[in-house]
Amino acid sequence: MTDQTQPAATPYTAHRRGDINDYPLLASPHITLSGPVDHDMYARFRDGLANAPKDTATVITISTLGGDPEVARLMGDDIRLLREFEGREFLFLGKVAVYSAGATFMSAFPVDKRFLTRGTRIMIHERIMNKTIEIAGPLKTCIANLKANLHEIEHSILIEEEGFRAIVEGSKVPIEDLVKRAPENWYIEADEARDLGLVLDVV
C-alpha cells in the first residue's frame, strides 16, 4: 500500500513571486520611511511607533540609499526591545532600494519577517571612514592619538561583523560569503534575496 500523505503546502516557492493578497497587511504599512537614514528619519520612526496599533503586526516600509549606520542600529534596537518585552510583531518591507544603513535596519528583523517589493535591490558594503589624522604635539600625545584612532577602527570592524551576522542569520548565505562580497558593494536583486533566504518573499 502506497503512502498517500502529501507534503504540507508552503506559502511560496523559489520560482514564484508572492502576491500581495498572500500578505494583506503589507498593502497598508503603518510606518513609511524614505530618504537618508538620519536623526530626522529616527524622529519619524518614533512617531510612527507611537501611533501604530499594538493588537496586530506592525508593517514598516523603507526606501533608502543609506545614511548613518548608528541610527539604523538605534531603530533596530527599538524594534528588538518592543518585540522582546511587549511581544509585538514587526514586518519589514523594503521598496526600490535598501542600501547600506537600510540593510543594517533590515538586519533587526528575522528573515521570516522580511519582504521586498518587485525590482527592489539590497546593497551591502563595508563601513567607510573618511578621516584625516594630524600628528602634532608631544610624542606621547601623538602615540595616544594614533592608538585612539586604531581602537576606533578595530571597534567599528567588530560592530560591522555583528551587523553582517545579523543580516545572514537564518538564511542560506554563509557569513564568509558576505564578508568576501561586501568590500565590492554587494547588490542583491529581490528575487535573488528571496532565493538566498535573506527575505521571506517578494510582493
Image (tube, rainbow, N blue to C red):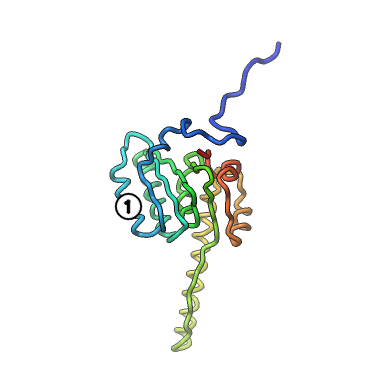
Total marks placed: 1
Question: Toward which corner of the image does residue 61 lie, by quadrant?
Answer: top left
Q: Amino acid at mark 1?
A: Arg
Dot 1 surroundings within 10 Å: few (below 14), some, or many (20 or more)?
Answer: some
Outermost residue on the right side: it is: 1
Q: Is residue 133 above or below residue 200?
A: below
Q: Is residue 159 above or below residue 114?
A: below
Taking the image as shown, residue 140 lies to the left or right of residue 175, namely: left
193 or 174: nearer the eye?
Answer: 193
Q: Is residue 16 above or below residue 150?
A: above
Outermost residue on the bottom side: it is: 138
27 or 89: nearer the eye?
Answer: 27
Where does the image place residue 82, in percent across and percent down from the top left? Answer: 36, 44
**Residue at point 35%, 41% (across, down):** 30
**Residue at point 47%, 34% (across, down):** 20
60 or 110: nearer the eye?
Answer: 60
183 or 26: nearer the eye?
Answer: 26
Q: Disc 1 designates what residue?
A: 44
Taking the image as shown, residue 183 lies to the left or right of residue 86, namely: right
Where does the image place residue 184, in percent across and percent down from the top left? Answer: 61, 61
Quadrant in which the N terminus appears: top right
Taking the image as shown, residue 62 lies to the left or right of residue 1, namely: left
Which secondary structure, mark 1? Answer: helix
Outermost residue on the top side: it is: 1
Q: Is residue 57 above or below residue 80?
A: above
Where does the image place residue 29, in percent across and percent down from the top left? Answer: 38, 41
Where does the image place residue 100, in percent across and percent down from the top left? Answer: 50, 57
